[in-house]
Amino acid sequence: MAETYRKELVQRMIRNFFDIQILRLVGAQPLWGYKIKKKVETDFHMKVRHGALYPMLNRLEQQGFLTSQKQRRGGRIRKVCTVTKNGKEFLQSYYKVLKEQFESKSRD
């Protein structure tokens, strides 16, 4: 039963914090859209539509959290994303807020 709840909670977190999850994945290693989609599906057991992923990547880039460069691989051009300094600071703030929330709840 606990595994069922775990899966539901992970999927809810991915949906509600999709931008943060993308930053976490790309922060671990530079990735391109299709690879991000496959990692989300594999790691979180959740389908991601291109129509949700690519606008999110564009939004994160406009916010200054991601940067991208076109790279040619095997005759194909990929837009490879990396996390910027601002993106790393945003993630650190996210982790700090999470930690504060958990610590304050454990004191109650």
Image: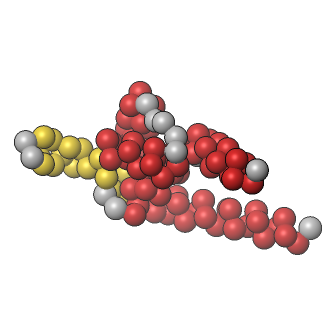
Residue at 70%, 47% (x, y): give it: 4
Placement of 26 over or under 106, stated as above or below: above
Q: Nearer the viewer, residue 20 or 86?
A: 20
Q: In this orientation, does residue 103 appear? A: yes
Q: Which of 88 and 73 is in front in this view?
A: 73
Q: Which residue lies furthest to the front in this view?
A: 1
Disc tally is: 0
Displayed quadrant of residue 101: bottom right
Q: Is residue 96 left or right of residue 88?
A: right
Residue at 34%, 62% (x, y): give it: 29
Residue at 52%, 58% (x, y): give it: 90
> Which quarter shows the C terminus?
bottom right
Residue 83, image x, y percentages = 38, 57
Q: Nearer the viewer, residue 17 or 94?
A: 17
Residue at 41%, 61% (x, y): give it: 27
Q: Residue furthest right?
A: 108
